[in-house]
Amino acid sequence: MRPTYETAQDRVNEQQVIDLLCGKWKCTARKTPAFYQTDWTLSRHGKVLAFVEIKFRNKSYDTYRLSLHKFSNMLLSSIASKLHHILAVC
């Protein structure tokens, strides 16, 4: 099994971001299982609208870096599901 680097503070930060998105977009969110290609699903009236991956930028870089594996999985899932896949970088 792959190691996980998610901390309790990461989960708090993610929840704050997802609450903000849900408030703005009038939807509900559900956390996806561990090691899924995205962190959350967004739904309205029981219909999934989008998938969201939330990342926090490491201050040691000027830009954000996303692994090719993560990007490829999100792209393929977007094509297959015909749903939006959102990358929220904080």
Image (cartoon, helix red, strand yellow):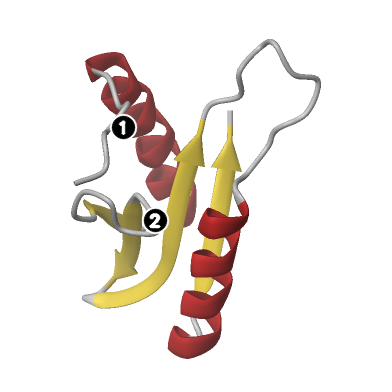
Quadrant showing the C terminus: top right
Which sits earlier in the primary sequence, circle 1 or circle 2?
1
Q: Residue at x 28, y 54 (%)?
A: 29
Q: Quarter of the image holding residue 44?
A: bottom left
Callout 2, which amino acid? Thr
Q: Residue at x 61, y 24 (%)?
A: 57
- In space, the residues marked 1 and 2 are separated at their CA atoms by 14 Å
Give residue 9's position: percent from left, percent from top. 30, 15
Helix, strand or loop at label 2? It is loop
**Mark 1, residue position:** 15
Give residue 32's position: percent from left, percent from top. 23, 55
Of 88 and 7, which appears nearest the observer?
7
Residue 24 image label: none
Q: Residue at x 39, y 56 (%)?
A: 38
Q: Relative to 9, is 87 above or below?
A: below
**Mark 2, residue position:** 38
Q: Residue at x 74, y 18 (%)?
A: 61
Label 1 environment density (alpha carbons within 10 Å; few <14, some 14–19, many ≥20): some
Specify whether 61 is left or right of 14.
Answer: right
Q: Quarter of the image holding residue 7?
A: top left
Give residue 72's position: percent from left, percent from top. 57, 67
Callout 1, which amino acid? Gln
Q: Relative to 49, is 40 above or below?
A: above
- Residues at circles 1 and 2 in contact by the CB criterion of under 8 Å: no
Q: Relative to 27, is 53 above or below?
A: above
Specify whether 72 is left or right of 54.
Answer: right
Of 43 and 73, which appears nearest the observer?
73
